[in-house]
Each structure stands twice: as structure tokens, then as C-alpha cells.
Image (cartoon, rainbow, N blue to C red):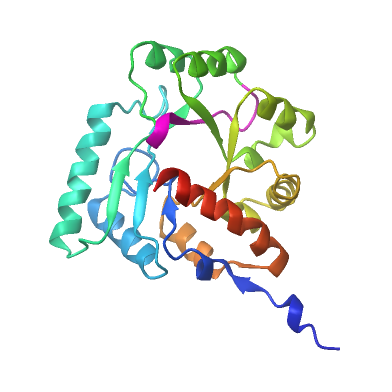
Amino acid sequence: MFHFFNKKKFLVDYLDGFIDVHNHILPGIDDGAKTVDESVALIQAFSEFGVKHFIATPHIMSNYYPNTKETIETALNELKNALIKNGLKDVSVEASAEHMIDDNFEYLLDNESVMPLKKDYLLVEMSYLQPPINFEDAIIKTASKRFFPILAHPERYGFLHHRKKRYYQYKENGIQFQMNLLSLSEYYGKEVPKMAVELLESGLIDFVASDVHNMTQLNALKKMTLSKKTIEQLLPLINNTIQTFY
């Protein structure tokens, strides 16, 4: 029996014109690209399948990557100059950040030191091991500052996998979800794609992004194949990401 209609499809074939709103392509300021050359190589590889628009989101994490608007803007300008030198004039890169909800997060909010995505969306993350004690207060304060919180890769927080009601509680509290495209593969392990599919099928995901840090991850993304059903579930999210942030 032929299984033509179950044939897997390459994800990147559906990303032409996509804007990647979560990635670590800025050089030398977190666990992403280490040099300008690495940054340019990543962008060139993205361009091969039609992704030429980026909002770079380096970590702001007080104990590990204490980035500021100044360090991020400096890295952004360095990358933009390199893009011009390499003839990549059709590539656009803006800068935001992935904000760890830690003991410094609320201070950043109070001092207008956060870096939102377009339209006042704020990308946030938390520890993979346990939620921060101040999570609810931080979200309330985020909203009070007129930002819309987006939780990065909710499918990757292992402590939530057995507390699934929390996902719905987060949504009820106004938190939007951004799923990593690589989470639909086994790149992060076997449990993450199960949760990614469950969140996808439950209609809880709002946006998608690459969260690419290096060429190994980008090559894994290029090799990803998905079922027709999963592609059909992803397309509205791809379009919503483009329409919201382009």
C-alpha cells in the first residue's frame, strides 16, 4: 500500500519570507554566535531558504549574560556593518532580547531597561528546572508597564510537563507562547516534541521562531521533516508571526 499522502515535508520549504523573532545571531554577547563571521554565516544559511528578516534576541540574564541596551546595540551595529561588507543588503536585523525572569528582571522593568519586540511584546524565559518565585509578580508588573509577555519555548520547561494546567493558567493570565521550531524534532530530547505537539494541537501556541544559536542547530532545522498535518497546524502560526512582527 502506498503512503503518498503521509509523505513528510521539509519545514524550511514553508519559511520563505519568515521573520525570525527569537535567535542568538548577534556576535559575542551570549551563548550564540561567537564572532561576526559566525553571525554572517548563520544569516547566509538562513537566506538559502528565504529567511532574511530577524529580530535578534540575546539573553539578558543577570548571573550569566548581563547584557544591556548598550552591549546589544554595539553588537547589532557590528553585525550590520559586516552584512554591508558581505553584500547582504537585503537582510534586515533588529535587536530585542530574551529576558530571564530572575531577581533582576523587575528592576529592569522599573528602570525602562528592557528591550521589547515590536509593538510592545516582551520575550521572557525562566529556568528549565523550576519556576521563579517572583514569576506571577513579574508578569503582573510586565503588563502594568504596558508590555505583552511572550513566554519563550514553553514546551521546553520540563517541570511543566506534569503540571499541564499551568499552561492554561498562564494563557488566562495573558501570557502568549512562542514555540521553537526545533522542538518538533527530537533535537532537545524525546519529551519536548511530545509537549510541543500537544500544545500545538491544543491551540495554545501563538508564535514560532528558530531560537538558533549555532550552525549545528541551523543544520538540524534544515533537515527537519514534518507530517502534512503538522505543517497545516504550523502555517497559521508562521503567518501570525510574520503579520505581528514584520
* Relative horizontal placement of residue 44, taking residue 129 as reference (left or right): left
Q: Is residue 125 magenta?
A: yes
Q: Residue at x 72, y 64 (%)?
A: 229
Instruction: In the displayed orientation, state which residue is furthest to the bottom.
Output: 1
User: Residue 162: horizontal and vertical position, in percent?
Assistant: 80, 34
Q: Residue at x 52, y 54 (%)?
A: 239
Residue 187 in sight: no
Instruction: In the displayed orientation, state which residue is furthest to the front.
Output: 243
* Relative horizontal placement of residue 99, taking residue 153 as reference (left or right): left
Q: Dividing the image into 4 quarters, which one contains the N terminus?
A: bottom right
User: Residue 177: horizontal and vertical position, in percent?
Assistant: 60, 38
Residue 214's quadrant in the figure?
Answer: bottom left
- Write the start and end of the magenta stretch as one range: 117-131
Along the line of sight, which residue is nearer the eye, 245 or 214?
245
Residue 9's quadrant in the figure?
Answer: bottom right
Residue 172 in sight: yes
Along the line of sight, which residue is nearer the eye, 72 or 1?
1
* Relative horizontal placement of residue 205, taking residue 55 as reference (left or right): right
Q: Is residue 175 above or below residue 182?
A: above
Q: Is residue 137 magenta?
A: no
User: Residue 96: horizontal and vertical position, in percent?
Assistant: 35, 36
Along the line of sight, which residue is nearer the eye, 153 or 16?
16
* Relative horizontal placement of residue 153, taking residue 77 as reference (left or right): right
Q: Residue at x 34, y 49 (%)?
A: 33
Q: Is residue 14 above or below residue 241?
A: below
User: Residue 167: horizontal and vertical position, in percent?
Assistant: 71, 32
